[in-house]
Amino acid sequence: MPSDELLEDVAARLRAARRVVALTGAGVSAESGVPTFRGASGEGLWERFRPEDLASFDAFERDPALVWRWYAWRRELVARCVPNPAHVALAELERRAPEFLLVTQNVDGLHAAAGSREIAELHGCLWRTRCLGCGAVAEDRRVPLPELPPRCGCGGLLRPDIVWFGEVLPEATLLRSFAAAMAAELVLVVGTSSLVYPAAAIPQQAARAGAFVVEVNLEPTPLTPLAGAFFAGPAAAVVPRLLGTAS
């Protein structure tokens, strides 16, 4: 675990900062039991598929029912998960900071469940659908879904409101994320490998613009040399200590 001196220095910076951005990745939700869906055992049918073979529009066009069966299975697993202390601490940080944005690469909805409100979901959300007919986007938390594939009230086919392989991130969400990071005094990066672009560029550009970057991860990443402080450890243990919310 990090030293008390370094923790207190970063905690003081977090208390003083008025403009804060947090960027989170799979490492935050893994501690809530959310599977990564890559290489996990015990998946039965889904062990025969790679995520790349199912999370694409081509796959959806070929067999929307199969793709939706995979997402329905994922939704059932994630529905059993609850926010962990890192999610809760980040929601508290939002309440403290006058200007705050939480940018996440996760699609599980656990940040919102923990109380975060200002969220930029780069990759979409598992609990929303988008109609291929009328374009309507709606929240749908039914588990299980009554029909696969589900359909919109207009009769159109629904797809998960998630960015699939081969698709671009939503421009407005991406622009909002970069703008907030470039204006931030402090950027807190939690549980992400910093390998996937353009998300990985958000804290990198913020650091070059003068923001103090704090990284929390199990191991160093390509971002670490640019970070003002790096804490090696599980997010659910480190983040609450940084914010003084650890029980």
Image (spheres, grey):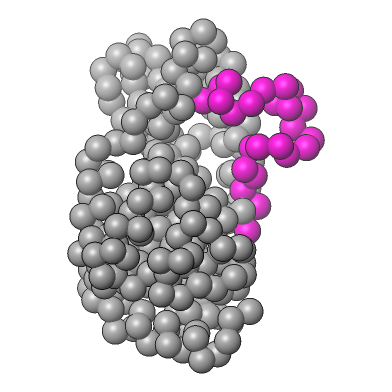
Q: Is residue 183 left or right of residue 85?
A: left
Q: Which residues are magenta?
A: 31-55
Q: Quadrant of the N terminus?
A: bottom right
Q: Quadrant of the C terminus?
A: bottom right
Please identify the residue farthest to the front as the structure is shown: 225
From the viewer's side, name the closer residue of 9 and 16: 9
Q: Is residue 180 left or right of residue 142?
A: left
The answer to whether residue 146 shows anywhere in this view is: no
Q: Is residue 27 magenta?
A: no
Name the residue: 53% across, 80% down.
241
Magenta stretch prevailing secondary structure: loop
Is residue 31 shown above or below 122? below
The answer to whether residue 58 shows anywhere in this view is: yes
Picture coordinates of residue 41, whole percent (x, y): 78, 37
Name the residue: 40% across, 43% down.
197
Name the residue: 55% across, 14% down.
65
Is residue 123 shown above or below 114? above
